[in-house]
């Protein structure tokens, strides 16, 4: 990874508004599209500055929040909710919309054709991985902190970005806090999914143990979809494989309960016989749609690519090694839900992804992906780091995370089954508080 540019990003301060307990200010930054060409094309980044009411004029240290994904903007706060309440006790927080998301220069089916051909679109999106996000942060930091290092809180993919940050720009970091986001340093996409499918199976069986009636309900829906075409309100087709992806709910603390309530209300009688209810299809569309986050599909496997080889639709290929995910068709075993996987058929069934089909194919075929982590630098790390590892996390393999934890000097882990992947949100301020105390050797 080339050196990070030293000059600060051009910045514009926008509106300042107030919510109970908060002062929020819009900030916009111009950064290079390609940091290897700092004088070339610029793109816009958006960050929401959040500070506790009554402390807006204090010289507080900065904490930048890196959202999970890839391809999702930072959360939009409503008051001092969940982890933000704890952070605002001592920090000025920057909720960064990573490049391509939210109010940053968008990258979606509406805007990507402006880049030109599918090949030009793929070349553009190849600059949207963790290494570019870290360079963006370092381009922004000097202007906000007057050159001082800042703290980073990385959730899920945001934690992956934080490990890239530790690898290539540790001088910019005061401390790093990671929740559900310690990546396998050498695990390619194939290794990630070989570890993921068994977790998906365990999560599904645990759900059926909690809600025994859901096994028959899920199978009935799958059998219906195998013989009846159902189209969701957004125009996307709900296939059996797409229905299985509702297992993404099982990665959150309340997800099993939400899945149960979704399944129990699936059918209504009609003149054409039983059909999926509008209530069910509306909720399924909201859970499955990538209209607002196409990068989650387009770049998902690329976040694991760093040895030059293409990913070649890894999740789709590796699924064939786990035939139990198809056995329900033969009446041999329950329907198993999947989760955080991307497949080429999604470019056909999902309305918002169809215009990006060739771009996605080119990214899956792309060679030359460069390393995202520096094992030697991590082994001599001096930045205080603490990480919450959620035991049997649906989205990030625990064994991969713990191997990485042993590879980062000074990192302290908190391994817990109290929370699922969304612990930093579901736990209120408790998860962040525990990580801060670990990073500071107070716990």
Image (cartoon, rainbow, N blue to C red):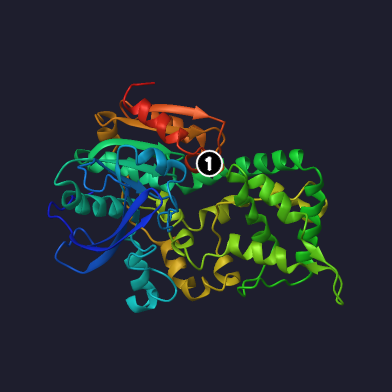
Q: Where residue 220 sits: x, y (%)?
A: 81, 57
Q: Tell me if residue 213 comes above or below residue 392 in the rendering.
A: below
- Left or right: where 293 falls relative to 284: left
Residue 427: image location, x then y, percent: 51, 37
Q: Nearer the viewer, residue 355 or 81?
A: 81
Relative image position of residue 233 (x, y in whole percent): 64, 73
Instruction: Identify which residue is drawn at 78% across, 56% down.
Output: 329
Residue 237 image point, x, y percent:
65, 71
Quick one: SS at disc 1?
Answer: helix
Q: Quadrant of the C terminus?
A: top left
At x 56%, y 74%, the residue is 351
Q: Crowdedness of circle 1 by 10 Å Cα count: few (<14), some, many (20+)? A: some
Please determine whether, in this image, residue 40 is positioned above or below residue 262. Answer: below
- Give the mark count: 1
216 lies left or right of 392 = right
**Can residue 404 be seen in the rendering of this structure?**
no
Name the residue nearer the viewer: 404 or 279: 279
Query: Which residue is denoted by mark 1 in the rendering?
Result: 426
Quarter of the rendering containing residue 173:
top left
Horizontally, residue 254 falls left or right of residue 442, namely: right
Q: Residue at x 62, y 75 (%)?
A: 235
Image position of 221 (left or right of 181): right
């Amino acid at each position: 990874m080339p050196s990070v540019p030293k000059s600060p990003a051009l910045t514009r301060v926008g509106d300042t508004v107030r919510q109970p307990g908060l002062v929020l200010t819009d900030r916009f930054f111009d950064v290079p599209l390609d940091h290897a060409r700092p004088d070339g094309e610029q793109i816009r980044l958006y960050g929401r500055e959040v500070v506790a009411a009554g402390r807006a004029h204090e010289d507080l240290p900065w904490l930048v929040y890196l959202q999970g994904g890839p391809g999702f903007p930072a959360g939009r706060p409503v008051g001092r909710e969940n982890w933000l309440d704890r952070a605002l006790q001592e920090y000025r927080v920057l909720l960064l919309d990573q490049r391509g998301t939210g109010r940053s220069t968008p990258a979606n089916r509406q805007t990507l054709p402006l880049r030109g051909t599918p090949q030009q679109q793929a070349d553009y999106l190849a600059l949207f991985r963790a290494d570019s996000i870290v360079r963006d942060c370092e381009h922004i930091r000097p202007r906000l902190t007057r050159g001082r290092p800042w703290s980073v809180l990385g959730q899920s993919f945001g934690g992956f970005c934080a490990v890239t940050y530790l690898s290539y720009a540790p001088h910019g970091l005061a401390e790093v806090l990671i929740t559900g986001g310690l990546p396998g340093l050498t695990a390619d996409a194939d290794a990630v999914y070989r570890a993921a499918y068994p977790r998906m199976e365990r999560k599904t069986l645990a759900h059926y143990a909690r809600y025994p009636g859901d096994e028959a309900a899920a199978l009935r829906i799958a059998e219906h979809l195998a013989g009846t075409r159902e189209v969701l309100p957004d125009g996307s087709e709900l296939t059996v494989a797409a229905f299985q992806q509702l297992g993404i709910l099982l990665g959150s603390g309340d997800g099993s309960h939400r899945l149960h309530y979704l399944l129990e209300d699936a059918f209504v009688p009609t003149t054409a016989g039983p059909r999926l209810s509008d209530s069910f299809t509306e909720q399924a569309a909201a859970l499955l749609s990538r209209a607002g986050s196409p990068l989650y599909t387009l770049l998902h496997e690329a976040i694991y690519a760093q040895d030059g080889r293409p990913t070649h639709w890894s999740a789709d290929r590796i699924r064939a090694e786990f035939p139990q995910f198809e056995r329900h068709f033969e009446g041999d075993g329950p329907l198993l839900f999947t989760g955080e996987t991307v497949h080429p058929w999604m470019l056909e069934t999902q309305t918002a992804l169809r215009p990006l089909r060739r771009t996605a194919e080119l990214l899956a075929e792309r060679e030359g992906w460069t390393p995202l982590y520096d094992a030697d630098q991590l082994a001599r790390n001096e930045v205080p780091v603490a990480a919450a590892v959620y035991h049997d996390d649906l989205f990030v393999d625990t064994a991969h995370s713990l191997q990485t934890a042993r590879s980062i000097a000074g990192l302290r882990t908190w391994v817990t089954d109290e929370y699922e992947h969304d612990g930093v949100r579901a736990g209120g301020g408790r998860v962040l508080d525990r990580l801060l105390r670990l990073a500071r050797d107070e716990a």
